[in-house]
Image (tube, rainbow, N blue to C red):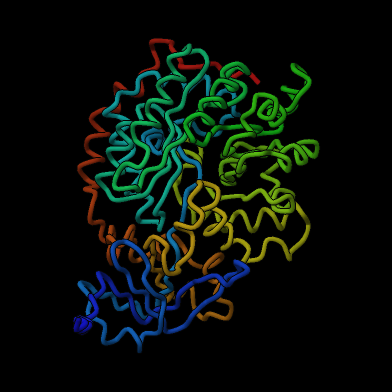
Amino acid sequence: MTPSPTPAPGPARGADLVITGCTVLTHDQDERVVFREDAAIVVRDGVVDDVTSTAEAAGLAAGERIDARGQVAMPGLVNCHTHAPMVALRGLAEDLPTEEWFNDVVWPVESNLTEQDVESGARLACAEMIRGGVTCFADHYFAMDAVAAVVAECGMRAHLGQAYFSSQGDRGREESLEFALRHRGGAGGRITTALAPHAPYTVTDADLAATAELARAHGLPVHLHASENRDQADTSLARHGVTPIEVLERTGVLDTDVLIAHGTGILERDLPVLARARGRTAVASAPRGYLKFGWPTTTPVRALREIGVPVGLATDGAASNNSLDVWEAMALTALIQKSTTGDPRWLTSRQALHHATLQSAQAVGLAGQVGSLAPGRRADIVLVDLTGPHTQPVHDLAATLVHSARSGDVRTTIVDGRILMRDRELLTIDVPEVVAELGRRMPALLDRSHGRRIQEYDT
């Protein structure tokens, strides 16, 4: 029998997107930050296909090309903990201690929230984050079906959880689970989900234990606040004899994959508890808010890193932070760590970039998918323009990115290979329309004459 001839290979399929002429922030085999000059990124089917030289990519057919000379290509930033719809409350509760901030302003106003308010707030927040180079955010709020719809529409990536308090009864926990199962893998895989009990001081041990059981049964992570500040840790010890972190251990939450928001009240005794956690444990740090509230401590980044707990960067909600600028969080993290440890060698700029990229991806459970620019990773890319006078000259590129560049230097934001902002022009969100809609809702949203609040802050 005469064998069939081997068919001649056809022409190689062109790329969907090629970015050329830039410096690419990559990572070596030890996860250290490395910069590759005059490089090109080739994207196919929403994935980084290759990181090569500009010369080698010159003849490659592409559906779209971006000349990025004078720019740095970085992995898109991840906002590891926020409450996106709370941009509607930006600047509403200023210069207040934590208890008054919650009880007198924020929780009374949140009792007025409608699904439309949440949707409009989320849309404005996504616009702000896209313009600041954030490609993924972890959100923990109410009416999260509306947030999921905005994420699907605007093209971002998100890790979403429907928050609940024990004061809602069993239904709050059930709705958190239903949301997580309904939206897991949504928006073409750009949405991941979590169970989202609010915090150990608003959720009972029984509800936390039930949440841990649900997380294990359904393969879901948990996203919650814990040991947000030192007062919460001290109050928990005085009332219950255990810290909030120890509560998470005894209720089984640390047997699941868990993202802990803030952790500025993590004590020395908590470190071995976190080190022996059986699930993937991470902490999200939002330093600007801690400064604003006058908290005496910050997230113990160095101690957590020494026990292998990744610390991702975050902003918290704009009601407390006034901003969703992860770029600022990166610079503040580096500066505050130097101040609190008394060591100018910690955190270095390269270490800060590591937290902003790989560690933030790990924190939201997306290690291996985002956080670095390498073949096989999702094409979540931001292009940062370093030609401005405030970023010149460049002697140390890492230091320039962390301490000189600003979120406004992001020129282009790409998620899954789709351009969401090009040359500072948002392509998926109409900001004036969103602002107008929020303006129409403000009188009803801000009314506190009813005397209601969704919860009581008492720690």
Is the N terminus in the top left, top right, bottom left or bottom right quadrant? bottom left
Please state which of residues 449 and 75 is positioned toward the viewer in this rendering.
75
Kindly give the residue lying farthest to the bottom in the view shown: 55
Q: Is residue 94 above or below residue 46?
A: above
Q: Is residue 213 above or below residue 124?
A: above
| Residue 245 relative to residue 320: left or right | right
| Lateral position of residue 58 relative to residue 358, left or right | left
Q: On the rendered structure, is 303 left or right of 434?
A: right
Quarter holding residue 114? top left
Which residue is farthest front? Answer: 1
- Residue 369 occupies quadrant: bottom left
| Residue 458 to residue 325: above or below | above
Q: Which quadrant of the rendered structure holds the C terminus?
A: top right
Could you say which quadrant of the image residue 144 lies in?
A: top left
Towards the viewer: 453 or 35:
35
Residue at (39%, 12%) from the top-left corner? 449
Question: Measuring 60% from the left and 36% from the top, which residue is drawn there?
Answer: 293
- Residue 319 horizontal/vertical position (percent): 46, 35
How far from the left and from the top, in percent, is residue 86? 40, 34
The front one of 373 and 244 is 373
Determine if residue 9 is in view: yes
At 44% from the left edge and 78% from the top edge, which residue is drawn? 23
217 with respect to 417 (left or right): right
As displayed, is residue 208 above or below residue 395?
above
